[in-house]
Amino acid sequence: MEQIAKGVWKISYGVPEEHTPVSMRKSKICFDGLEQVGKTANETIPDFIGQLTCQIRRRGVTITYPMDSDEDIYGFGLQLLSMNYAGRRRYTKVNSDPRMDTGESHAPVPFYISTAGYGLFVDTYRYVTFSMGTNARKGASAQKKEVNQPHEEFSESALYALKKSNETRQVLIDIPSAEGIDIYVFAGDIMEVVQRYNLFSGGGCLPPMWGLGIWYRAYGGCDGESIVRLADSFREDHMPIDVIGIEPGWHSHSYACTFDWSYLFPEPGAMLKSLQEKDFHVNLWEHAFVYPAAEIYDSLQDYSGDCEVWNGLVPDLSLSGAQLVFKKWHQEHLMEKGVTGFKLDECDNSDFNPSNWSFPDASQFPSGMDGEQMHSAIGVLYQQMMEQAFREENIRTLSQVRSSGALAAPLPFVLYSDLYQHEEFIRGIATAPFSGLLWSPEVRDCVNGEDLLRRIQTVCFSTQALINSWRIPSPPWKQTNIEKNLAGIEIEEAKYYTDTCRRIFELRMSLLPYLYSAFVEYYKNGIPPIRPLCMEYPHDLQVRNIDDQYFFGKDMMVCPITMAQKGEREAYLPEGKWYDLFSGEEIMGGKWFHIRADVEKIPVYVRDGAVVPFAEPVQCVREDTVFHMHVRHYGKKAGSFVLYEDDFTSYDYEVNGFRKIQILVDETGRKSILGIEVCKKYLF
Ligand code: GAL
């Protein structure tokens, strides 16, 4: 065992595999940040470490240790179907459409957090089975001979009551194929463990300010002219939009990709210039499978795996040769023309699509990785390469990705999915932050107007406010129904929905500086900008299973409502006073409430003493944007807030740091603002 940093230990068994998340990492551990986490100067080693056993057999590596009966377990990456895994099993296989709650996901991560004061990361690309409270070791129940519990009744419920026996629980981690493994242990309560894992990963990413604005992905059938017309219509309608996404139709061949413009975009340079002049950022859809007609095809031959996907090469993105070819093409042909982000699609895997979808687990790559390892790695390798491409130009991106994995916190990519249950999408907001991931509950077509407004509200209180209209030609606020949208029929209330969506977008825009500060905390201290309640209140047993409420930034707690809930739901407010974000109404916490919410309002509650800076909403974030701010103080307690300023677009903050404005409010409500003279982008 080796101490890596304060509160972080590494334990090695046998001979670990060559390719693992740690061996392939690009970001450095944030030792300075790790020094700041936690209350004590020197964190003690979590007790369970003394009870770990490891066996290395033909099957692979098995790690076991006893588990407390009251331990709750979180993590394992993006999980849409549940949040607490005490007494459950998780299987960390990449799968874009898991039908059951097995742990499979777009972004499974072999890392979990226990409420017993630790987190554990298994450094592997293998599909691991974690049994979090499973069968006891042989012999553990031998004393039952003496204390026999005979059946007194043979009803189903009586039989099953005995089945839920009080065996000593244990954790069993099954890592097939490996002949050795490194595991990393993080000490602390839930928040501290998450901070330590994120800082060990390299610290949270910091998106450019424009990336926090509203995103709109245009219809897949759009050509260059219709994209420009759409952009014009947003500005005419005063719809705040920062990013326009262009879907597969821009490639001359998209499954697999050519990374070159199709006949629909005869003058891509002019289109990009026109969008830039209107202050839009452009994000292009792609995936990593390379079609024979692509110019980079020949150069990638020797760097690709032994199977094709959709007639294309599967580049081994762990190799610097493959990365160079890929990066150079993107930099010269797309980024230098003004493209500021990409949507890295299809890099996950699926068990339910046709079998030529993605590469088999048994495939081989020139680096020596097999298909199983590559499935776990490719999402992160792809992100690392594209982030590097932007970094070399000193341009920050916020982009999208459909698969991610371990140690991904420093990567400025947001996950999305083709699954579309609103309730599951809300759960994703709560579960992704346990494992250093960002998630967008994107909005597409909707069942009706209420569904649209409720989803738009949720997405505006998430990392990335994304409207993905790739299947619908008109924005969903003009027609929610996909068939009617395709037929060009507008809903009668299009004006009402346009105006209401605009108001919700404007609320999001007014919170941009507030959210940016939360991301600076992510970057510096590893605190996720959006997080579940149990990270904030680890000692409140009521919040342990709440996966439909979450914190947005420093002090706001969001309780989204889905259409299925018909405007009402139960919500829990932890101990203390809370205030309605909009009306300022005071509510005493420490209990459950039945709340109702008008279709135009998402319930958001703010902590006592919270200081919230609101900006006058802008249409989009430009280089010369100045945010005109006003500050609201909620409740009676003294409070503070720090706004961070840099150029909002480059990596210069890594060297120069930030300028800060500290807003202080005392118990009498008197505000003072420190540091304002050096800040140019905020005005009060
Ligand atoms: C899907 C993706 C969608 C859309 C579509 C285009 O894989 O999830 O958002 O981009 O591809 O073909």
Image (spheres, rainbow, N blue to C red):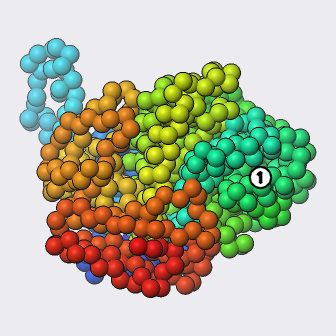
Residue type for callout 1: Pro
What is the number of callouts on the image?
A: 1
Expressed as whole percent of the image width and height from the top left, the position of residue 395 reads: 67, 69
The quarter holding residue 272 reads bottom right
Of residue 300 and residue 175, the one placed in the foreground of this image is 300
- Can you say whether 171 is above or below 197 in the image? above
In the picture, which quadrant includes the C terminus?
bottom left
Label 1, on which residue? 315
Which of 592 and 312 lies nearest the eye of the viewer?
592
* Rendered residue at 47%/85% (across/down): 678
The quarter of the picture where residue 218 lies is: top right
The image shows residue 538 at horizontal and vertical percentages of: 24, 57
Relative to 577, 86 lies left or right: right
> Does residue 520 appear in this view?
yes
Image quadrant occupied by the N terminus:
bottom left
Please identify the residue farthest to the top as the structure is shown.
155
Task: Tell me the crowding category of disc 1: few under 14, some 14 to 19, or many 20 or more residues within 10 angstroms, Cα based.
Answer: many
Q: Is residue 636 above or below residue 463?
A: below
Q: Is residue 661 above or below residue 196?
A: below
Q: Does the image show residue 22?
A: no
Residue at image coords 70%, 57%? 278
Residue located at (73% from left, 60% from top) = 277
Q: Residue at x 21, y 23 (%)?
A: 160
Horizontal side of 144 relative to 506 (left or right) equals left
Left/right placement of residue 269 relative to residue 217 reads right
Residue 475: x percent and y percent? 61, 36
Helix, strand or loop under label 1: loop
Q: Nearer the viewer, residue 35 or 525?
A: 525
Q: Position of residue 630 (x, y in %)?
A: 37, 66
